[in-house]
Amino acid sequence: MDELINRARRILKDSNNVVVLSGVKLMEETGLTDLRAEKKAYDIEITYGFSPEEMLTEGFFSRRTHLFFRYYREHVLQMEKLVPTPAHEAVAKLEEDMKLKAVITRTVYGLYQEAGVNNVIELHGSIHKNICPRCGRNFTASFIAESKESVPHCPDCQVAIHPKFTMFGERIDNGKISRAAEAVSSADTLILAGAALDSPLGTYAKQYYRGEHFITINDVPEPDNPMITLSFTGKCSEIMPKIVAY
Ligand SMILES: [Zn+2]
């Protein structure tokens, strides 16, 4: 392990254009359970009469706006209490050292920004983006959580506020996909943290990455692949801070 860590440190020391693909396993290290995890999905269905996949959709938002916001507040916005892990902090250090080009993530809780990272491509949007469809004003997660109305409205327009994360069945916006593809294809080092190469996030690496070094970190061993330079098995919050201590 120590030898691997040293090699990763040397790679990062010489890199100027690092891209981090940040996966759901890293997110789980904050204590989050995936909404689709079996037991939790069952409990949610008992409480609300619908599954997360049914509720977090555009159709449900327009038809049952009250229930949508009840679920959004009681479950999705609860994640606002999550705090960044040492892995998020390590990525912030990479940016501070002018080495980081971008972080690309499918999670929506804004933890990289909270750790101080500026260039985050949130493929599925963010719980901190809740827009008034009339005037375009943005409302934070706390505004929605603390609002006394069961359906929060824009105070200027009296129109229901629309959360802007990507709902189930919705396509990721093309602009974000191109920005992510561009970042990956021009990186000199790519880190896939908390996801397998054979995952939706991993496909960005396979499709677009042509750079020199490719480091993977995941809780299960990654099968050998000629693309991969170094592969770590373990927690991102333990490994990332070690390899960023170059
Ligand atoms: Zn408005």
Image (cartoon, rainbow, N blue to C red):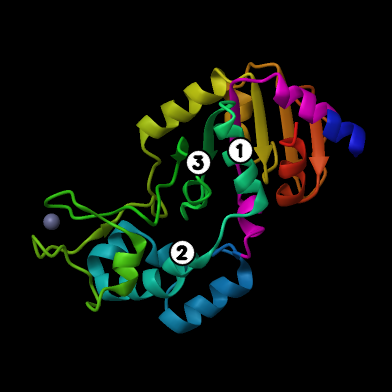
Relative to residue 24, is residue 7 depicted above or below? above
In the displayed structure image, the side of residue 234 where residue 87 appears, left or right: left
Which stretch appears magenta? 7-31
What is the distance, in whole Å, between disc 2 and disc 1 at their CAs? 23 Å
Mark toward the start of the polypeptide (1 vs 3): 1
Residue 149 percent location from the top left of the image: 22, 77
Relative to 97, say whether 42 is above or below: below
Give the number of the mark in front: 3 or 2.
3
Which of the labelled discs sits on residue 93, or is there none?
1
Is label 3's Cβ within 8 Å of ligand 1?
Answer: no
Image location (x, y in percent) of residue 139:
26, 58
The three-letter amino acid code for the residue at tag 1 is Lys
Residues marked 2 and 1 touching at CB (< 8 Å): no
Label 1 packing within 10 angstroms: few (<14), some (14-19), many (20+): some
Assign a secondary structure to mark 3.
loop
Q: As rendered, which of 209 and 96 lies closer to the eye?
A: 96
In the image, the residue with mark 1 has its CB under 8 Å from the nearest atom of ligand 1: no
From where the camera sits, is residue 131 visible? Answer: yes
The residue identified by callout 3 is 117
Q: Residue 214 has which mark?
A: none
Q: Nearer the viewer, residue 116 or 179?
A: 116
Q: Tell me where residue 207 sits by quadrant.
A: top right
Q: Is residue 174 toward the left or the right of residue 155 in the image?
A: right
Membership of 19 in magenta stretch? yes
Residue behind mark 2: 80
Q: Position of residue 14 (x, y in %)?
A: 71, 18
